[in-house]
Amino acid sequence: MSDFIGQNERAVLAPYTKAVAVTKSDSTIIPATRALYIGGAGAVVVTMMDGSEATFSAVPVGTTLKIRVTQVKNATAATNILALY
């Protein structure tokens, strides 16, 4: 998988330029995010860019999780999630 962010240090510090609504799925792979915006509170279950799975419990409304993920799993209770690039 090509990782533009990992190869471009300035891109890490730049503002986000794209937001895409996330559909929860245990099978769909999305391009590696720079962050997730959480519009509705709840647990967020993801596959991290390295392939490991992580659960972020009780994420409050309006949180930006600065995590690189390739999946937002069906077990996610949070809603209105945006992938930020």
Image: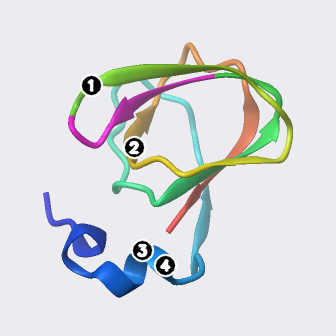
Please rate how many residues cluster around mark 3, counting C-alpha atoms within 10 Å: few if below 14, some from 14 to 19, many from 20: some
> CA gap, disc 3 to disc 2?
15 Å
Please rate how many residues cluster around mark 2, counting C-alpha atoms within 10 Å: few if below 14, some from 14 to 19, many from 20: many
Read off the residue under disc 1: 52
Determine which of the numbered discs, if any, sits on residue 12 in the image: 3
Magenta extent: 44-50
Pinpoint residue 34: horizontal percent, then vertical percent: 46, 60
63 w.r.t. 32: above or below? above
Pinpoint residue 14: horizontal percent, then vertical percent: 52, 83
> CA gap, disc 3 to disc 1?
21 Å
Please rate how many residues cluster around mark 4, counting C-alpha atoms within 10 Å: few if below 14, some from 14 to 19, many from 20: few
Badge 3 element: helix
The structure residue drawn at horizontal position 40% and vertical position 49%, both measured from the top left corner, is 68
> CA gap, disc 2 to disc 4?
18 Å
> How many numbered badges does the structure rendering display?
4
The structure residue drawn at horizontal position 58% and vertical position 45%, both measured from the top left corner, is 22
Foreground mark, 3 or 1, reads 3
